[in-house]
Image (tube, grey):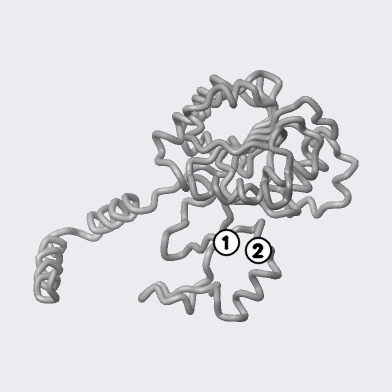
């Protein structure tokens, strides 16, 4: 569109808005915002403008501080022009830090995972898989990832560090197409899903997990399931499915800053 046509379009939109009252304008603004970046739960305030994704497996807090000081990252953005110079950004990760992985395998889960299969749903760069490989004695570790490029990176990493291909496997697939892997897994680790799927598919995935995760399995999530299911209006359907449980290796908790891992939850499947 030319500058002239853009101005003409803006003028027509403003003419339409001039007939609306303040309440109608607020409703329209909310509707427009919801169409572009709708999220649920504790990350519902994340937008493309105010959020920066930093993989905490690759970059811990000290590394992030270095990137900020060097000018490669900013912690702020301008609410008027979106220049990253004023407001503090929300930093999120779709991975897990090395410390969080140690907490999962040295505190939350049982010490002995021999003959158990660990499944990471949406394995991305493979952080959970590598943690499971080096921090546990699990017999089988499987990562299911839809993104082919991420799968290739994980495969290269496995080869580079000579990880046993009979113990750790990468599957390029939608998890909904691999009920066999879900059924054979004893420990399922799931990061927040709503950044990658719309609400309807998000619901479909939890119904799928309820159907195929076998009783007695462990589910590890980085958000309370009560919060997730409430936001999806699924609490009633899932009420009897999960039971939150205490860490299996509680004696090791003294070696960790417990508050730093308050967003990691362990459940058993009923």
Q: Is residue 125 above or below residue 8?
A: above
Q: Secondary structure at mark 1?
A: loop
Q: Is residue 99 left or right of residue 249?
A: left
Farthest right residue in view: 251
Q: Residue 206: x, y in percent?
A: 51, 29
Q: Nearer the viewer, residue 34 or 55?
A: 55
Q: Residue at x 80, y 54 (%)?
A: 257
Whether 266 is drawn above or below 53: the answer is above
Task: Give the secondary structure at mark 2.
Answer: loop
- Specify few, some or many for label 1: CA neighbours under 10 Å numbering under 14, 14-19, or 20 or more: some
Identity of the residue drawn at 48% across and 78% down: 86
Left or right of 52, for residue 242: right
207 left or right of 80? right
Q: Indicate which disc residue 59 carries.
A: 2
* Mark 1 → mark 2, Cα distance in angstroms: 7 Å
Rendering coords of residue 234 (x, y %) = 48, 29
Q: Is residue 48 left or right of residue 268?
A: left
Q: Which residue is mark 1?
A: 54
Q: Position of residue 240 (x, y in %)?
A: 61, 20
Query: In the picture shown, does residue 95 fall above or below 206?
Result: below
The residue shown at (47%, 34%) is 174
Quadrant where the C terminus is found in the figure = top right
Q: Position of residue 48 (x, y in %)?
A: 42, 61
* Observer-nearest of 170 and 25: 170
For the N terminus, the image quarter is: bottom left
Disc 1 + disc 2, Cβ < 8 Å = yes
């Amino acid at each position: 569109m030319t500058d002239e046509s853009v101005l003409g379009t803006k003028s027509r939109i403003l003419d339409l808005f001039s007939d609306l009252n303040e309440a109608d304008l607020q409703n329209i603004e909310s509707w427009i915002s919801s169409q572009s970046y709708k999220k649920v739960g504790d990350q519902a305030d994340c937008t493309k403008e105010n959020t920066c994704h930093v993989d905490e497996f690759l970059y811990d807090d000290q590394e992030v501080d270095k990137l900020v000081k060097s000018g490669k990252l900013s912690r702020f953005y301008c609410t008027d022009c979106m220049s990253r110079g004023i407001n503090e950004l929300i930093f999120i990760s779709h991975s897990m830090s090395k410390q969080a992985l140690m907490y999962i395998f040295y505190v939350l889960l049982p010490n002995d995972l021999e003959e158990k299969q660990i499944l990471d749903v949406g394995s991305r760069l493979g952080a959970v898989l590598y943690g499971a490989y080096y921090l546990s004695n699990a017999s089988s570790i499987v990562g299911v990832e839809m993104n082919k490029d991420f799968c290739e990176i994980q495969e290269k990493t496995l080869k580079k560090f000579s990880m046993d291909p009979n113990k750790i496997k990468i599957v390029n697939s939608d998890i909904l197409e691999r009920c066999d892997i879900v059924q054979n897994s004893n420990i399922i680790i799931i990061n927040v899903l709503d950044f990658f799927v719309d609400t309807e598919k998000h619901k479909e995935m939890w119904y799928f997990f309820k159907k195929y995760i076998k009783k007695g399995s462990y589910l590890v999530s980085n958000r309370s399931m009560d919060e997730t299911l409430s936001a999806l209006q699924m609490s009633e359907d899932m009420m009897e499915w999960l039971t939150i449980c205490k860490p299996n290796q509680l004696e090791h908790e003294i070696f960790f800053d417990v508050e730093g891992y308050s967003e990691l939850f362990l459940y058993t499947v009923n």
